[in-house]
Amino acid sequence: MSIERTTVVNEGISLAVFETGNPDGETIVLVHGWPDTHELWSHIVPLLSDRFRVISYDTRGAGESTVPRERSAYRLSNLASDFYAVIDAVSPGEPVHVLAHDWGAVEVWEAAGEPRAVDRIRSYTSISGPNLDHLGRWSRSKLSKPTFAGLKQVLAQTRASWYTVTFHIPGLSRLRIKRQFAKGWPAFLQEFSDVDPALVTQNSTLWSDATNGVNRYRANILPRLTAPRARHIAIPVQLIVNTEDVAVRPFHYDDTSNWVEHLTRNDIPAGHWSPISHATDIAALTEAYIDSVATPPVPA
């Protein structure tokens, strides 16, 4: 496949954008998470390219894009602004489909909550990246009327997310990342997410992407979980829930329908990095969901 690389500039940040696939097809935008680059999608892009015009990009702080040093540059509002800058550049006249993973999914959830989303996002498939406001509201609902099952779920998600606490402490975060990746990225993904190491390519920027990317956690986790907003989503959303995900536990999505008007959920027996381990499933579910979105949703 031929890949065209361009640059989109937003807020002084240069974003590396990559285009391939069917130039006459609908546009689908792929957004990676931490500590990946656009190469996360290397197994999925070939499965979508015959039908779709496929766009991916390195988010700020990753890969070939600009790396801001200040924590404030990684706030969700800035990351959502980057997303809109990219889709406005690559598809100014038509809404796009979106597939996002991990922090890429968190960022697109933020963008999906903006009023302009109904005109710019045709469908959104989210993998292993919660809406932080929804997560905060879910936690509060479990704690405000505690039950044994509810408290057990909150504790389970807190335990799964404990590493995010260490990411708020600069020296400790670097030590944790160094220890996690000591055996190499393929070995880490095999242990953490049961990914076949033969499927994994370690990016040359992995270490810097990982250490720079923790600013996403520092800029957003506490503000959103301690003061969650009421974020109603009017666009069509598909949740692909990885039932074996040890970082994002499946049950916290149970009340997502309270916030999303047009929601579809599909569970698959996969770990966190399913775009690598279950690329065929992800591509098939995404394409089937796009087919199911026959008409645009009526704006709220």
Image (cartoon, grey):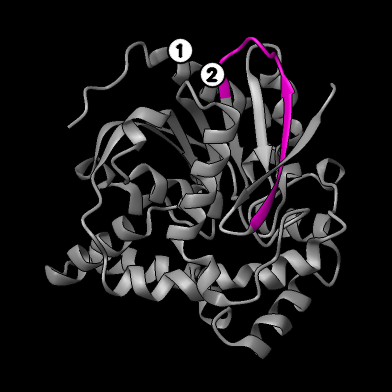
Determine which residue is flagged by label 2. Answer: 287
In the image: residue 2, left or right of residue 262: right
Q: Is residue 278 visible?
A: no
Q: The disc labelled 2 sits on which kind of residue? A: Glu
In the image: residue 253, left or right of residue 190: left
Please state the horizontal and vertical placement of residue 195, each as a whole percent of the image. 73, 46
Disc 2 element? helix
Please state the horizontal and vertical placement of residue 279, each as a whole percent of the image. 67, 31
Q: Nearer the viewer, residue 185 or 244?
A: 185
Task: Report the residue at 86% width, 67% height from top.
Answer: 183
Q: Which residues are magenta?
A: 13-27
Is 172 placed above or below 296 here?
below
Determine which residue is flagged by label 1. Answer: 291
Does the residue at mark 1 contact the one at mark 2 (Cβ under 8 Å)?
yes
Quadrant of the rendered structure where residue 300 is?
Answer: top left
Q: Nearer the viewer, residue 37 or 283?
A: 37
Mark sitting on residue 229:
none
Q: The disc labelled 1 sits on which kind of residue? A: Asp
Disc 1 element? helix
280 drawn magenta: no
Q: Is residue 205 visible?
A: yes
